Image: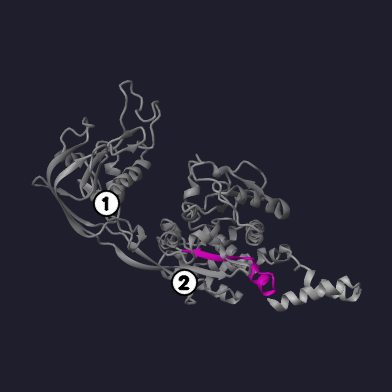
Amino acid sequence: MKKVFSLFLLAIIVAACGSSSANKTSTSTVMTPKKVADPVEYANTITSADLKTALYTYASDDFEGRETGQPGQKKAVNFIKEHYMEYGIPAAKKDGDYFQNVPLEVMAAPEVKANINGKDFAYIDNLVSVSSSNTGILNASEVVYAGYGIEDENYSDYTNLDIKGKVVLFKSGEPKNEDGTFFITGTDEASKWSNMRQQFAEKKDVAEEKGAKAVLFYYPEVYDMVASRFGRASGRMTLAGNADDMYFFIVNPDLAKSILSDIDENNTPTVVKTSLTIDYKNNSEQLASENVAAFLKGTEKPDEIIVISAHLDHEGIKDGKVYNGADDDGSGTVAVLEIAQAFAKASKEGNGPKRSILFLNVTGEEKGLLGSQYYSDMDPIFPLSNTIADLNIDMIGRTDPKRKSENRNYVYLIGSDKLSTELHNISEEMNTKYMNIELDYTFNDDNDPNRFYYRSDHYNFAKNNIPVIFYFNGTHDDYHQPSDTPDKIQYDLLENRTRLVFYTAWELANRENRIVVDKTPEE
């Protein structure tokens, strides 16, 4: 420190003495700022030719559809790893392993025996488990009836009702007023507590938060459908070690009425004396899969991290046909690799990003966003508090035949404005400055019936208050079909969209201040 200060002081003295040559020397060594790199030079290394070459391999029959945990998926992770090694981008993990192991379970039908008040009830015929739970025997001398199982600011079935460690019975739907309007909304419109999809999760979550040991959900309107879909488990996957401590069963009228005979008419929470035994055996099988994570360390703010993600898996082989998944999500995978190569070139030339970049290729997206869930919920390689944004790429190589605009040079953006106004503005500015792609926010609507915001890996970052952008071309006739092949990719569009992601990442990585989270997901 002293030496630097002395040189600086000397330069000032020489300048004061009027020495022009000395003044020029001091300016070049002390005052000239580092030249700001032009990102265009590096964006231009992202080409349709390179994307096409990579995708014709990645989405070939040799990769067997890249189904999670299967041999084709193992080929995929090694393909990705080899590219990062070729670019000179190190592994994200400290042990030098590019693979983040993601332990999974393949769900199989559990063995369940139930006896209530001396009567046996059969699995599937009378009750169905709709979540993976731990093997165990449940005994109870009473069941807490919680009416509709609702906990809302306008209505609660849990007032003065203790369910911690208890078996809870509740039913579908919500209360109404005498005039037929719904009590909670005060209108003819039902609340989320009656929504077929939402009430499963909402009512389960309330019971779990209150410490219930088991839930018996009486939902006669959908019982047969649920029993058919979930009763004989179809190979659905979940994260290993993620089994519920709480048992969650959908029950039919015979079982529900053996506990409370007037359950259809009775809305009053109460405790019912009941002799209940449920013997539950989890038959799920273990399966190993991997995320691939490479890390380019920032030059000035290395602890602040931008994630660029895409899922590496697809549907595998069905009925002897390979589901190549060229668009879903081969297009996103090769885009991440091309972006990584561009940043690696900049870094080698002394223009590395100020902030760090995590290139994250996740597994199990098609099985329920499992790889990204494992990263965000169980084993983030870097603290989520240090993660400033996730740019997630899932299907950017095709066009949406249902889209009304004739401009094929577009991309759907989802989520850009949901948590950070700055992120949205930066995205718009980078597009205007460099690409002029039509940015389509059709599916960014909170009321989008497709719920795309919740259906790709960015969501596991967004739910942790990390700003996201989901880049998407929309679905098409080849979506989740064996006909999603690399010859149908529009490589000029894939190039444009990949460059847009690169420019946005470049700005996020090199701007002076970290973007601000100024919204909540509800706004």
Classify mark 1: residues with Cα within 10 Å, few (<14), some (14-19) or many (20+). Answer: many
- Asked which secondary structure carries label 2, the reply is strand
| 98 is higher (above) or lower (below) than 222 | below
> Callout 1, which amino acid?
Gly
Can residue 353 be seen here? Answer: yes
Q: Is residue 138 left or right of residue 428?
A: left
Chain-order first, disc 2 or disc 1: 2
Q: Which residue is mark 2?
A: 99
| 432 is higher (above) or lower (below) than 34 | above
Asked whether the beta carbons under mark 2 and mark 1 sit within 8 Å of each other, the answer is no
> Callout 2, which amino acid?
Phe
| 83 is higher (above) or lower (below) than 433 | below
Q: Residue furthest left?
A: 118
Q: Which residues are magenta?
A: 342-362
Quadrant that contains the N terminus: bottom right
In this view, the residue in front, 399 or 179, is: 179
Question: Which-is-in-front pick, marks 2 and 1?
Answer: 2
Q: Where does residue 29 sit, x and y in percent of width and height?
A: 79, 74
Classify mark 2: residues with Cα within 10 Å, few (<14), some (14-19) or many (20+). Answer: many
Q: Where does residue 391 sit, x and y in percent of width and height?
A: 57, 57
| 44 is higher (above) or lower (below) than 429 | below
Q: Which residue is mark 1?
A: 231
In this view, the residue in front, 520 or 328, is: 520
Q: Is 189 covered by the magenta stretch? A: no
Q: Where does residue 11 sit, x and y in percent of width and height?
A: 82, 74
